[in-house]
Image (cartoon, helix red, strand yellow):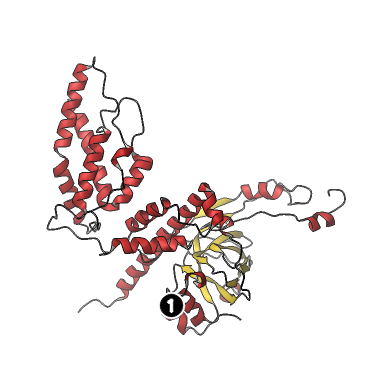
Amino acid sequence: MILKADQIAHRLGGSTAPADRLFIRPQPPVDELSGTGAASVDLRLGTWFVTLPRNRISHLDIIADPAIAEDYAHLAKEHHVPFSKQFFLHPKDFVLASTLEWVRMPTRLAGYLVGRSSWGRRGLIIATAAGVHPGFTGCLTLELSNVGEVTIAPEPGLPICQLFLHEVNTQSELADRSLFLGYRKPLIGSIELDDIAKALARSDVA
Amino acid sequence: MPAYTWAFQQIQEYFCDFVGTRIFGESYFHAFAYLLCPHTLQQRSEFYPNMISRVAAQIDAAKAYGASIPESYQSLFRDMLEPPEVERHRRFLLELADGAASSLVPDLIHHVDSLLSIPGIPKWKSPSMQPETTPTDSVVHESDKPTEQMNEIIEDFKAVAPTQNTGSLPNILNAAWKARHDPQLWIQHPSLSKNPDDRDRMLKELILKSIEVLEVESRILEFQKEKLPSPA
């Protein structure tokens, strides 16, 4: 069941039991959120960006060269854009960003993040790691891409995406995932091959 | 002239300590012990007060400003070596400088308090350390119950979430140091409590995000003030 905005607002309240409490910081105004009648909460663009510049790597073939994805990630450059400044995203540019809000999910909630269609219609596509797992804590990484014909200059603080939340139908406590999470900046993350992927890989490199 | 120059430089150090104490309260002492103090077992520099005098002056300042002092703070420090006996002239000049600088400490503590009261920087009001002197123009810290506010911030950190509505940077920093020294902080999160590096990394992220949240709150407040119609 997807949570309505007033239910989300209730989860943000201090009266909720700590285990069931949802943290979104900076917290959206609870009164305004309750009155929207929506089924999501808007999240804003944060102040950290990561770019992956053009380089000498011709292509990423992680089957043949598992280390190449890490090498590519090491080329990433971090950029801090203060409030009231802009980040220029030219046509065909791709950048990682993070949400301004730090989200701490209780163990009984999961969610998914989607871009706002009003930005998409202007060429700014916000693809993201859609799933937000129970117990997640940190800022969410966004993948921004300008597929339009005009440069777009978003500023930190702009509402850029929305978080939908739903309850997880389980009574069991989830594993402690905190070790892997809890970042303010966009994360590139690693690509790991499991045994099935290795078994299905091209025979010349497997 | 060297004695005058050394005394002048030492007074600057005292001044900076008092400004740090007046603005940041107890967190300044933690930062001083952790990072700022000159860590050397060698001979002291003439430009710095020796450690025992310096720390004693910091504690006087804390008492005057109502800031609390970390437990066993003084025991973290010891004096650095004075110049050797054979350098009698230098020792004499340094004694003059030390004496001149330390004689100005009470006035300097009061001067810093007055100076920082002008822009309205709030005064500390530690429950365990009430100010001994209360200048008439001083402002009391916004929170009447600083311990409760600290606890609220630490509760947010325990939930692995940044804090909000803290009102000031010193509140975040003071709570952050308390959280750092609390071995029970993440007892509910074994993956964080096991490894000190992970624990420090996470705490750093939470503190920096909390500071950004404070900036967002301040900007919203300023914006709302500007939107209010000015009185006719």
Which chain letter goes with mark 1?
Answer: A
- Check the picture and name the quadrant holding the C terminus of chain B: bottom left
SS category of the residue bearing label 1:
helix
Q: Is residue B162 left or right of residue A96?
A: left
- Check the picture and name the quadrant holding the N terminus of chain B: top left
Q: What's the residue at 41%, 54% (across, down)? A: B179
Kindly identify which residue carries mark 1: A30
| Residue B172 place in picture, x, y as percent | 37, 57
Q: Is residue B172 left or right of residue A16?
A: left
| Residue B87 place in picture, x, y as percent | 23, 16
Q: What's the residue at 14%, 36% (across, down)? A: B103
Q: Is residue A30 left or right of residue A177?
A: left
Q: Is residue B71 above or below residue A81?
A: above
**What's under tag 1, amino acid-wise?**
Val
| The quadrant where residue B86 appears | top left
Q: Is residue B94 above or below residue B142?
A: above
Q: What's the residue at 17%, 44% (across, down)? A: B108
Of all residues, the one furthest to the right in this rendering is A203
| The quadrant where residue B8 appears | top left
| Residue B126 place in picture, x, y as percent | 25, 56
Q: Is residue B74 above or below residue A42?
A: above
| Residue A137 place in picture, x, y as percent | 54, 63
